[in-house]
Image: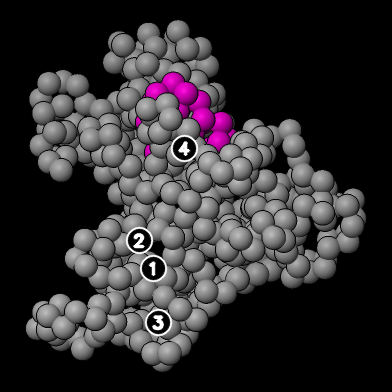
Amino acid sequence: MELVSKLHKRAEDGNPISVGIIGCGQMGSGLAHAINNVHGMSIDAIADIDTSRAIETLVSLGYDRSDILETNSRSEAEDALKRGKRVVTQDALLMTALDALEANVEATGVTDIGAQVAYRSIINHKPIIMLNVETDITVGWYLNHLARSYGSLYTVASGDEPGVCKMLYEQARLMGFDVVTLGKGKNNKINFDATADMVREEALSKGMNPKMLAAFQDGTKTMVEMAAVSNATGLVPDVPGMHGPHVETNDLASVFIPVKDGGIFSGPGRVDYSTGPIAPGVFAIVYTEDQRMRKEMKFITRADGPYYLHFRPYHLCDLETPQSIAEAVLLNEVTVTAEAMHSEVACKAKRTIKAGEVLEDIGGRDWYGQIITYGESVKRKAVPIGIGSKAVALRDIPKGAIITEDDVRLNDKTFIYRLRRMQDSLYNGGGK
């Protein structure tokens, strides 16, 4: 791909890739530091509702406060960027219209903002790289479809589990293997009852948003990540919520395989996770019947097969995202996108919800996400997590129940709700 040499050429020409970041929390600020250390790439603008966070991030990169302009005006922002200054804004959508920026990275984790930013970026023919996988698993198929029709580019970022799993998938397929399983490690058991209030102290000690930490602990993030993998590859969960057994690394290739061969799956082609010591790694279980390939694998890896483990012991989140930026801008290539709707992450009640109650967002008190197949989701009219916020319960919903569109009145005022309805109409109407 020659990305590094292409970036060096951009640097030598005094024309580094100009990047904007939307959302300057843990991921966004980490990405800013990564970009700052990439020769041929420049972090030029940051949007965040709390502009002080964006300013402090730029200062920590070595920029003087006098070289940072805080504005919500497009003309002022464009003028500042032309003069070599950095821009900070509260207006996320402003970033999608700035001609000086060559690409934006969406890192808010807020589904409605993510949908608006991605849509506007696509319309403005500006590559959009998503660190907001929650938005992607809700409307990513539509956004990808829209980007291709506009000659624009939409992609989920490298570094998060979906991007790294897709890399393992592509490598395995290009070696002639069948991919039986794509999976990730989770560093603790799921606590379905976790809420932001319960984890607040721990979250603040780690510099995290409490709702985000709760979404990790209640399993929603794991479901989201593997749903994105599913929609990019066609592999599906074997059971609702996946199995999630505790497995040692050396045993992965004997557990995450079909039952007929001693494993846990009803068949091949599955996504899942392990709570064993493989976190923060990701893995692929691959298969071949070819005797010569098996001979090669025996010689190289000492494994007997026919199932083999391809293992990457880490994913580096925002630190790997510059690769997706470079691929998008320099090669017009995506890292991972939803090719079809194979899986959905549905809202499942954390507690008994009473009629008339207004549901909270991801990481709240009311629901967590559970991955199910898309066909099952359509059949049950399950509410996708990306549009579950601020829904009003029309009747009592028991703890542990999948929340359906018959149970609630959805908040139809959000942009992501409208985008999801467009996706449903197009996809189920024959656009897939």
For the residue labelled by badge 3, is the local secondary structure a helix, a strand or a loop? loop
Q: Position of residue 325 (x, y in %)?
A: 30, 37
Find residue 165 and name its label. 2
Of mark 2 and mark 4, the one earlier in the sequence is 4
Left or right: 371, with 55 as reference point: right
Of mark 3 and mark 2, the one earlier in the sequence is 2
**Residue type at numbered disc 2:** Cys
Residue 126 position by quadrant:
top left
Of mark 1 and mark 3, the one earlier in the sequence is 1
Q: Indicate whether 351 appears above or below 387.
A: below
Q: Indicate whether 177 appears above or below 77.
A: below
Of mark 1 and mark 2, the one earlier in the sequence is 2
Other residues around mark 3 within 10 Å, as few (<14) / some (14–19) / many (≥20): many
**Residue type at numbered disc 1:** Leu
**Residue type at numbered disc 4:** His
Q: Position of residue 274 (x, y in %)?
A: 45, 76
Q: Position of residue 300 (x, y in %)?
A: 11, 79
Query: Which residue is pictured at 50% across the width and 20% down the height?
Result: 94
Which residue in the protein does label 4 denote? 145
Labels 1 and 2 touching (C-beta < 8 A): yes
Which residue in the protein does label 3 denote? 257
Residue 212 position by quadrant:
bottom right
For the residue labelled by badge 2, is the local secondary structure a helix, a strand or a loop? helix
Find residue 182 and name its label. 1
Asked which colour scheme the image uses, the reply is one colour
